[in-house]
């Protein structure tokens, strides 16, 4: 069987764990060559995944990685790495706000900018930026994270308009509550059980379920979906229980 | 290519042409047993589809087909049929107002109601209702069409919330102007060019592209997207 992404090169940030790891695994399974990043050199990556150490909160490290991306000229780019650090509005720490925006917004912007010329040369490209339900949706103490993710969606929509004539499709995927280390650091187990009950599907997402949507959007079957922020949230964003 | 829908029964309304035909073809190719409707007694459906005659502007015909759907107990339901005709707001004929609501809103909801009990028994179901960019964006002359499509989205989201615990996912897909006979028979080449230029991708949508998206959402790969209104529009809805 010919694999649908044979001959395609993909870059996935934050590919050593969670959603990014699942995305890298599925891209590899579809036949793509995958370059993943993590903050530490020699991180634990899926089998067959090339890797680069990049610190997305460090502009010099991002600039260096962008030069690598320009040379790689990937067909597929998934900006997955992100950080969340809930802080109530009056307690927002300026340095932390900047750090979150550096990682969640500035770095994806720079990496998209580095990848676009190659995709234009190929006449084919797929960018999927991982946003969040905390953009379309709100919750207390999410202003730092939500503003970075909403901005990522706004940026992606504009990039989609510019890139579309070149065969480059750009979308965001907004995961709902997903069983990752990130959510485990924010919510204790009893709170996670309550979160699951609040979702119409009555369970949290597994990273693999988010990855499947990302990989479809990044693949050859997607010919016309662009400029969208697609919520993979088990119905959470549409339901209001009393 | 694999057959991800082998063993699944699918119902697609309006399967004789345009987007519905492409969806039916794609579901057949993916291995599903596909039942399609058309308004004609001898509707020409894609190879491998079982034909059912149904007129969704006729309550008796709708009720009869809803009975057939309940018996079939499909795993997948794609409500694709829709009518559209732009009218200046003050000139909307009452008869069209009622027809649009019957075909675009009441019929899909009725068929969902007929299909859900079987999906609950299967513990697995996928509903995809085809709306329109005019259910999200607005343009002069689209009041009734837009209202029915937006209404269908909200109804679908409610079904999604209610049925999620049973493994049933329900979404709407909103295509942009798509290269169907319906469109190319109405507009000349110059107008079609102008429409294509108004889209960031600089071309209209192809029925096969909508079908690929619908088939993915209706298939086993989608396990957590539900209650959404998903645009397939080449960037049109976000661009001005």
Image: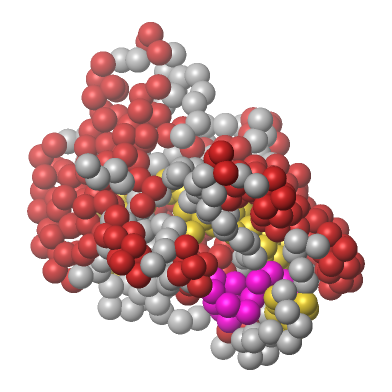
Total numbered badges shown on the rendered structure: 0
Q: Is residue A233 above or below residue A137?
A: below
Relative side of B47 to A101, left or right: left
Where is residue A49 drawn, in percent x and y? 69, 85
Where is residue A144 drawn, in percent x and y? 60, 47
- Can I make out residue B23 in this image? no
What residue is drawn where x is 57% and y is 57%?
A85
What residue is drawn where x is 31% and y is 39%?
B154
Where is residue A120 drawn, in percent x and y? 82, 58
Q: Which range is magenta?
A: A8-26
Where is residue B196 drawn, in percent x and y? 66, 39
What residue is drawn where x is 61% and y is 44%?
A92
Nearer to us in this view, B2 or A189: A189
Relative side of A86 to B105, left or right: right
What residue is drawn where x is 40% and y is 42%?
B131
Q: Is residue B13 above or below residue B192?
A: below
| Residue located farthest toward the front when viewing the structure as drawn | A91
Relative side of B5 to B232, left or right: left
- Residue A192: quarter of image: bottom left
- Residue A22: quarter of image: bottom right
Based on the picture, tell me whether residue B126 belongs to the magenta stretch. Answer: no
| Residue located farthest toward the top when viewing the structure as drawn | B90
- Quadrant housing the N terminus of chain A: bottom right
- Can I make out residue A62 in this image? yes
Nearer to us in this view, A18 or A238: A18
| Residue located farthest toward the bottom when viewing the structure as drawn | A47
Relative side of B86 to A110, left or right: left
- Residue B5: quarter of image: bottom left
């Amino acid at each position: 069987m010919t694999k649908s992404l044979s001959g395609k090169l993909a870059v996935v940030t934050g590919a050593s764990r969670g959603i990014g790891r699942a995305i890298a695994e599925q891209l590899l399974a579809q036949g793509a060559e995958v370059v993943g990043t993590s903050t530490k050199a020699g991180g634990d990556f899926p089998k067959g995944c090339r890797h680069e150490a990049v610190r997305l909160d460090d502009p010099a490290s991002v600039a260096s990685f962008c030069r690598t991306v320009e040379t790689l000229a990937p067909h597929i780019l998934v900006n997955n790495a992100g950080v969340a650090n809930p802080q109530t509005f009056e307690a927002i720490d300026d340095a932390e706000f900047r750090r979150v925006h550096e990682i969640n917004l500035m770095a994806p912007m720079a990496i998209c900018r580095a990848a676009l010329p190659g995709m234009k040369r190929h006449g084919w490209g797929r960018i999927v930026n991982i946003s969040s339900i905390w953009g379309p949706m709100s919750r207390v103490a999410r202003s730092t994270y939500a503003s970075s993710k909403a901005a990522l969606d706004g940026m992606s929509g504009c990039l989609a308009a510019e890139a579309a004539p070149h065969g480059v499709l750009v979308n965001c995927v907004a995961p709902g509550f997903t069983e990752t280390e990130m959510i485990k650091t924010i919510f204790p187990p009893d709170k996670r059980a309550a979160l699951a009950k609040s979702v119409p599907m009555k369970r949290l997402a597994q990273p693999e379920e988010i990855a499947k949507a990302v990989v479809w959007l990044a693949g050859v079957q997607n010919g016309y979906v662009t400029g969208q922020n697609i919520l993979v949230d088990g119905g959470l964003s549409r339901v209001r229980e009393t | 290519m694999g057959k991800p829908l082998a063993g699944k029964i699918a119902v697609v309304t309006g399967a004789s042409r345009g987007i519905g035909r492409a969806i039916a073809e794609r579901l057949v190719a993916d291995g599903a047993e596909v039942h399609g409707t058309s308004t004609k007694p001898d509707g020409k459906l894609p190879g491998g589809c079982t034909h059912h005659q149904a007129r969704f502007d006729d309550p008796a015909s709708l009720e009869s087909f809803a009975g057939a759907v309940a018996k079939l107990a499909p795993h997948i339901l794609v409500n694709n049929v829709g009518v559209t005709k732009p009218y200046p707001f003050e000139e909307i004929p009452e008869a069209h107002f009622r027809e649009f609501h019957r075909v675009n809103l009441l019929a899909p909801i009725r068929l969902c109601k007929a299909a859900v009990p079987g999906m609950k028994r299967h513990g697995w179901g996928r509903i995809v209702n085809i709306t329109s960019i005019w259910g999200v964006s607005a343009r002069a002359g689209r009041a009734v069409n837009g209202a029915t499509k937006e209404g269908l989205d909200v109804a679908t989201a409610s079904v999604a919330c209610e049925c999620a615990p049973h493994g049933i996912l329900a979404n709407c897909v909103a295509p942009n102007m798509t290269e169907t006979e319906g469109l190319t028979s109405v507009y000349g080449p110059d107008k079609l060019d102008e429409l294509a230029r108004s889209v960031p991708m600089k071309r209209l949508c192809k029925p096969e592209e909508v079908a690929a998206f619908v088939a993915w959402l209706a298939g086993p790969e989608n396990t957590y997207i539900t209650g959404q209104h998903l645009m397939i529009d080449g960037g049109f809805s976000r661009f001005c």
